[in-house]
């Protein structure tokens, strides 16, 4: 379960127009009407930002803590969700640049982030690919933004980003839908053809065994704040966010033959656990029975999205 930092929960509460009176029906109406811009920002802050924060945080857990990430470029940074997540993960963070095409989101990002100013933070207005800077960053993040653009725009953007921005890590996150996975696959194909090394969810540049069969996606559980519960008319203290992702690195990845990704929720049944595993040799469904003591103990602990 991902906890949303209390400072972020509070910053969101302070930056929505009327957190006291807002309700679920009003938010749904705001979301459907592009005319009410303020309503759209309110909706994003209350209902999407906590979920995208959780997805980014979960994906960043794949990158080792000692990766020495000092500089970050966040492309399509929205209200600065990525800044909150990278600073939580890496205490080595020194500077962060957010590129964003919507001035309203930039203003929001500035307001939200006043309480976490210990890093050098810059918000850069501009639309990619044209507005992309020529700066190198240890980690380049694109979260929940690629799908808002045409394949041509994405292709030009990745071309620039890979050549001019990524020093070591590129992280792309999309909604956990067939469409989101398709975008991830297109970026994966470009990267493998251009010298990048796929780091996660697969370790290695092999052909994705799921193409044409299924879509690779994961789920992260996040704690719901009082405000989130209220605006969603929800009673559950948590929600699940589905996402697809890709982590690429510049340095060649050490391949570990044993390493498989758990690509579905493990099915726990009396006396056995069924795991859906994906690795270089393909996709495999494996059943571990209680009699396989050591393996069963391990299988009981693993979750969807872990590697084994
Ligand atoms: C769904 S929001 C995601 C925001 C943030 N990355 C997150 O994960 O919460 C997508 C953001 O990407 C921005 N965006 C989409 N296409 C863009 C482009 N071509 N250039 C700059 N920003 C773009 C949008 O304005 C929006 O703020």
Image (spheres, rainbow, N blue to C red):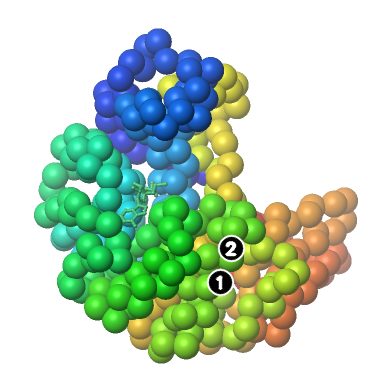
Q: Mark 1 — residue?
A: 185
Question: Residue visible at 43% across and 58% down?
Answer: 149
142 relative to 115, above or below: below
Residue 154 occupies quadrant: bottom left
Question: Residue visible at 63% across and 78% down?
Answer: 208
Ligand 1 within 8 Å, label 2 CB = no
Ligand 1 within 8 Å, label 1 CB = no
Secondary-structure class at tag 2: helix
* Relative side of 223 to 64, left or right: right
Of all residues, the one furthest to the top in this rendering is 21
Question: Residue visible at 22% across and 55% down?
Answer: 126
> Which disc is residue 181 wearing?
2
Residues packed near mark 1 inside 10 Å, few (<14), some (14 to 19) or many (20 plus): many
Q: Is residue 113 visible?
A: no
Residue 90 occupies quadrant: bottom left
CB under 8 Å between discs 2 and 1:
yes
Question: Residue visible at 18% across and 54% down?
Answer: 124
Picture coordinates of residue 119, whole percent (x, y): 14, 52
53 relative to 43, above or below: below
- Compute the Cα span from label 2 to label 1: 6 Å
Picture coordinates of residue 8, whole percent (x, y): 31, 35
């Amino acid at each position: 379960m991902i906890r949303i930092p209390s400072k972020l929960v509070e910053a969101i509460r302070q930056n929505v127009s009327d957190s006291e009176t807002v309700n679920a029906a009003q938010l749904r109406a705001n979301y459907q009407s592009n005319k009410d811009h303020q309503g759209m920002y309110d909706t994003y802050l209350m209902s999407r930002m906590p979920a995208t924060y959780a997805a980014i945080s979960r994906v960043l857990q794949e990158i080792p803590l000692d990766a020495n990430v000092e500089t970050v470029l966040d492309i399509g940074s929205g209200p600065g969700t990525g800044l909150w997540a990278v600073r939580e993960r890496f205490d080595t963070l020194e500077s962060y640049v957010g590129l964003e095409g919507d001035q309203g989101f930039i203003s929001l990002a500035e307001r939200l982030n006043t309480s976490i100013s210990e890093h050098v933070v810059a918000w850069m207005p501009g639309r990619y690919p044209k507005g992309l800077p020529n700066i190198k960053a240890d980690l380049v993040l694109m979260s929940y933004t690629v799908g808002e653009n045409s394949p041509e725009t994405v292709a030009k953007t990745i071309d620039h980003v890979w050549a001019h921005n990524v020093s070591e890590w590129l992280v792309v996150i999309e909604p956990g839908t067939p469409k989101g996975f398709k975008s991830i696959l297109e970026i994966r194909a470009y990267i493998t053809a251009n010298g990048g090394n796929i780091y996660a969810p697969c370790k290695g540049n092999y052909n994705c065994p799921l193409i044409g069969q299924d879509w690779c996606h994961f789920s992260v559980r996040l704690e719901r704040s009082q405000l989130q519960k209220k605006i969603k008319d929800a009673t559950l203290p948590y929600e699940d966010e589905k996402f697809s992702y890709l982590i690429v690195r510049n340095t060649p990845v050490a391949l570990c033959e044993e390493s498989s990704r758990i690509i579905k929720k493990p099915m726990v049944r009396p006396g056995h656990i069924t795991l859906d595993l994906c690795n270089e040799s393909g996709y495999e469904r494996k059943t571990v029975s209680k009699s396989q003591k050591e393996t069963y103990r391990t299988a009981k602990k693993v979750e969807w999205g872990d590697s084994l």
